[in-house]
Image (cartoon, rainbow, N blue to C red):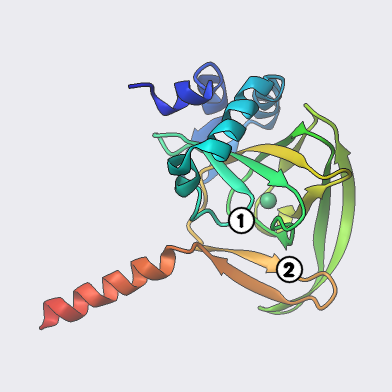
Amino acid sequence: MTLFEERLGLEDYIPVLRSSFQIEDEPTIEFQMAGDALRKLLEDQSVMMRVLELLAHDIHFVREQATNLFNNEIVLWRDPDGSFSLRMAIWAEGADNFIHDHNATGVTGCWFGKLLIENYEIKEKISEDRVKLEMKDKHILSPRNVVYIKMHDEGIHRIDKAEGDFAISLSAYSRAVPRGYIRRFDAITGAVSRIHHPVRKQKEWAQSLLTLIEKG
Ligand SMILES: [Fe+2]
């Protein structure tokens, strides 16, 4: 049986990426090393084509992606040692392109088309669910260009296609800190909402049910 990483053609890239991430108490990343490693993978469009083929024709592969947090996110690799994950995203009409933060730090690059990255900062924290948000800077990435993504307040961003019908991004993210949700921001109203992983509710329900049933 072919291993998943071999099937996608990732096996040459994983060891270098892995060494860019440290598994300490706090997830850390060697930005320069991770950026260089990701750039090598971004030069290899055959990996991207294999993923697109699987998405287009392999129902099992598509089903594995069904519970991702964003509707345009495809998880290519979760390192068994928990140090990092590799995620591709397709930017098209209808893709989840809202402003958000992350519980992880990482690098994001352009694999296809032109990618728009907008970085935001909180100018004023009005309450837990309302802030004053302002755009800090904006980048347009061509294929093989990478940017670094920080976590929580330091890395609030929005990604989208910059032009045309499609763009593809590839990101390597560190292990997430255990917060249990990411935040979604509305730039106009300043509303902040929490987005939980879709299976989180099922986990909570099952834990409550087990306690209830065990109590008799
Ligand atoms: Fe993101």
SS type, badge 1: loop
Q: How far from the left and from the top, in percent, is residue 91? A: 74, 47
Left/right placement of residue 77 relative to residue 148 reads left
Which corner quadrant holds the C terminus? bottom left
Q: Between tags 1 and 2, which lies in front?
A: 1
Q: Residue at x 50, y 53 (%)?
A: 66
Q: What number is the disc on residue 200?
A: none
Q: Residue at x 51, y 33 (%)?
A: 22
| Mark 1 neighbour density, 10 Å: few (under 14) some (14–19) many (20 or more) | some
Determine whether 195 is above or below 86 in the image: below
- Tell me if I can see residue 99 in this picture: yes
Question: Residue 212 falls in which quadrant of the image?
Answer: bottom left
The residue that label 1 is drawn on is: 70
| Mark 2 neighbour density, 10 Å: few (under 14) some (14–19) many (20 or more) | many
- Which amino acid, by three-letter code, is at mark 2? Phe
Left/right placement of residue 147 relative to residue 65 reads right
The answer for how far apart the CA atoms under marks 1 and 2 are is 14 Å
* Residue that sits furthest to the left in the current view: 216
Whether the residue carrying mark 1 lies under 8 Å from ligand 1 is answered with: yes
The residue that label 2 is drawn on is: 185
In depth, the one of 173 and 65 nearer the eye is: 65
Left/right placement of residue 53 relative to residue 81 reads right
Q: How far from the left and from the top, in percent, is residue 29? A: 60, 35
SS type, badge 2: strand
- Which amino acid, by three-letter code, is at mark 1? Phe
